[in-house]
Image (cartoon, rainbow, N blue to C red):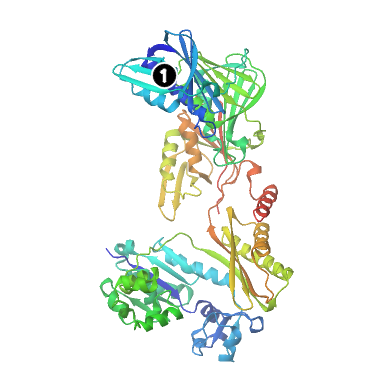
Amino acid sequence: MNFTCTKSDITFGVKIASRAVGSGSTLPILAGIKMQTKGSELQLIATDLERAIMVTVPIENKGSEGAYVLNGQLLSKITGMLPDDKLSMKLDENGDKVVISSGTATFELLLQPVEDYPQLPEPPKETLLTIRRDRLVRALERTAFAAMSARETSRLNLTGVDIVTKGDKLRMVATNGYRLALKEEMLSGKTVEGEYLIDADTLKELHSILGGFSDETIKVAHKSDHLFFITSKMIFAARVIQEEYPNIERVIPKENKMGLYLNRDALFGALQRAEITTTPESGAVILEVTDSLLYIRSSSAEKGQTEESIPLLKPADPIKISFRGEYLIDALRRMSSSEVVLWLKDSESAGLLETVDDEEDQGFLYVCMPIRMD
Amino acid sequence: MSRRIIHIDMDAFYASIEQRDDPALRGKPVIVGGRPNERGVVAAASYEARKYGIHSAMATSRAIKLCPHVMLVRGRMSHYRDISKEIRAILYSYTQLVEPLSLDEAFLDVTECIEEYGSASKIGREIKERVRNETQLTCSVGVAPNKFTAKIASDLKKPDGFVVVRPEKVKDFLKDLPVSRIWGVGRATESRLHELQINTIGDVRRFELHDLVREFGKWGARLHELSHGIDERPVSADRETKSISRETTFARDIMEMGKLQEVLIELAKEVRDDLQNENLKARTLQIKVRYADFTTITRSFTFKEHMDQLEILQETAQLLLRHKVEPDPQGIRLIGIGVSNLTDERPQMPLLKELDSSGQNDLTRLLQDLRSSFH
C-alpha cells in the first residue's frame, strides 16, 4: 500500500464506513475498517455482521494493490484531525504498520490481521428496483422511527421495517404494536413482487448516510438473506430478518369518518408543550373538540398541567380522546405538509393521521391507538 | 424557610362511621373486627370502648372479656374506602402534595399554599370544619414544620384535637414528651433508653450524636435529629394506595396444604377485586404465613410488568406457598396476600392484538413464564 489522497475524500469514506463498524466485543476484527486499494480507488469496508458498507474514494495510487485492516475508531479520529488537505498512506518497511503523513504530522498504526476479516455479502448482477434517492430517503425517514427498539423487545419482527415491492411501487411499514407508520413511494420503473423485513436501526443508518451522496437514483438488489442499496460510490448491505411480519391491513382504520383538519405546525407545537406535563409512564395527552376548537391538555400530579386550544380548519363533531403525545409528535415532526388531518372514530379506536395535500407526504399513513380514559 | 406540614388523623375511623350510620351504636362501646370464635382481631374501637382498655390489634375475644357488653360490628371495607375518598378530595382541594398513610391518615405539605390561604393553621382549621360538615366525622389535626412533629401534634389532643406547633417552638414542644413517642421506640429500645436515664425527648438532647450512634447504631443518629425537632423527610405524593392486602386467621391451626391453597385462591380474588375497584395494577405480590408459635414469614415475587389478572395473582400466590414456604408440623395460624408496587396508569391500547396483555394467548405465555421462574 502506498497512496495519496485528499483529506475530504478519506474523511468522507471513513465517516460512512464507520456506520457499520462493530463494537469488537464479539469479534475483535470487526472493530476495524478494511482498506483495499484497487487501481485509482480505495475501498473502505466495515461490517458488524448485521449490516455491511463498502464505500469507494479516489486516490493517487503509487504502489501495488492490497488489503489491510486498521482500527476504525483510530482512523476516524486521525482523519478528522489531519493538519493538511492531503495525506499519504503507506506500509512501513517491516510490513506490520501503516504510516499516515499529512503536513507536519505522522502517525504509525498497527495492522490487524486481514485474513481474520469476514467475507462480505456480494450483490447480484440484476437489480430488484431503482428508486429516486430523495424518495427512498423520505420513505425511510417517515417509517423506521416507528419500529420497536431491539433493546425493548424479544419480538424480532417488530424491530424491522417491512418493505414490500410490487409493480411500480414500494411500501415501507414499521410498528411497535401501538402505532404504525406506512409510506408508499413510486419507483423508477417496474419491480418484482417481494417482501423484505430489515432491521429499523440499520435503515436509520442508511437514511442518514444517503444524505451525503449526490446520486439521482439508488439501485436495490436482493440475494439470499441480504438486501443491497447501491450508489455509484457505495454498497450498503442489510441482513433480512427471517420472521413473518404481522398482517397490518386489518389495523389500518377504514371507518374513521370524523376528520380533524389542522395546521401541522400548530398541532405539533401544542403537543410538544402539552408533553411537558404528561406523566412519564403513559405520556398521555387529551385531545377534545368543542366549538370548532381542538383543546389539547395534559396533567400529572407531580408536574401540573397544560392547556391550549388550536382552531379546526373544518368543522367537526365533539369528541374526546387520549393519545401518548410522543407518538403523535414523532410523526408530525417528520411530515412536511402544512395541513394534516386526524381521522377518528371514537375514543377507543385507532386514529389515522395523514396529509391533506403534500407531495412529499403523499402515500404516508400514521395509525395510533389511544390510551384508555376512565 | 421552614415547611408547613399538616397531619390529619380521623378519630376511631371505622368505629365512628358505624356509629354515624347506625344511631343504635352511638355513645356505646363499639368494636369493628372479626368474630371471637374465628380468632379475629379488633380493627377499630370507639372511644367508649377504649375506656375499657380495648385497642386495635387486640384479639376480639380479649376485648369481649374486658367489656362484655361491647357491640361487635363486621367491617365494611369498601364503605370505609369510599368515605376515605371523600376526605381525600377535601385534602386535594388545597394541594396535590398529599401523602395518604392509610385510609384514615395523611400528611399534607401546604408550604406553597400559605399565600393563598393565610396560614397553615387556617388550612388545618378549615379541613377539620369541612370534614365535619361533609362527612359528620371528626378528625385530629397537627400542624408543624415537619412530619414527625405534626404527627405527634395531631395525636396529642385526640379526639377532635387541633394542635399547632410554630417552628420556633418545636424544641420546647417536644422537650417533655415521653421518648416512646418517637417512631421505632419499641419496648426493648425503651428499656435501654431508660437505663440511660432517657425518659423524655428532651433527655435525648443530653447525649452527643456519636454517643447515641455508638449505643444505637444508625437509629441513634435519627434519634438525635428527631430529639432536636429535625425531620427532613418530604411529603411524597407518589400514589394514593401503596399496597393492598388481605389475610385470614384460622379458627384452628391448619396443616393441610390443600386447605391453605384454597384460602389463598380466595384471598387472591379479594385482592384482585380491590385492585380493580381502585383501577390499579401491581408489580409485587407477597404472601404472609404465621405459624402456630407466632413466627411470621413473608415471601414475595416481582413481575416484569404490572398485573391485575386473577389467574396470575392466584398462581403466583400458590407457587410462593409451594416453593418458598417450609411446611411445619406445628401448623399455620394465619395466611395472607398483599400486593404492592402499584400503578394507576391507564393503559396504552395495543394496535396489534398479539400485544394485548389481557388476551388469552398472553395469559398462557405469562403463566408459563411464571412457572418456569420457580424452577
Indicate the quadrant containing the C terminus of chain A: top left, top right, bottom left or bottom right. Answer: bottom right
Type of the residue with mark 1: Val
A3 vs A29, left or right, is: left
Q: Which residue ends up furthest to the front in the rendered image?
A: A94
Q: Would you name the residue on which mark 1 appears?
A: A98
Q: Residues within 10 Å of mark 1 (few under 14, many from 20)?
A: many
Quarter-of-image position of residue A252: top right
| A97 versus B36 height, above or below | above
Q: Which residue ends up furthest to the left in the rendered image?
A: B168
- For the point 68% across and 67% down, the residue is B266
B61, A135: nearer the viewer: B61
Residue B369: x and y, percent? 66, 51
Residue A236: x and y, percent? 54, 21
- For the point 38% across and 64% down, the residue is B233
- For the point 54% across and 64% down, the residue is B243
| A291 versus B7 height, above or below | above
Q: Secondary structure at mark 1?
A: strand
Q: Is residue B229 visible?
A: no
Indicate the quadrant containing the N terminus of chain A: top left, top right, bottom left or bottom right. Answer: top left
Residue A337: x and y, percent? 47, 28
B153 vs B52, left or right, is: left
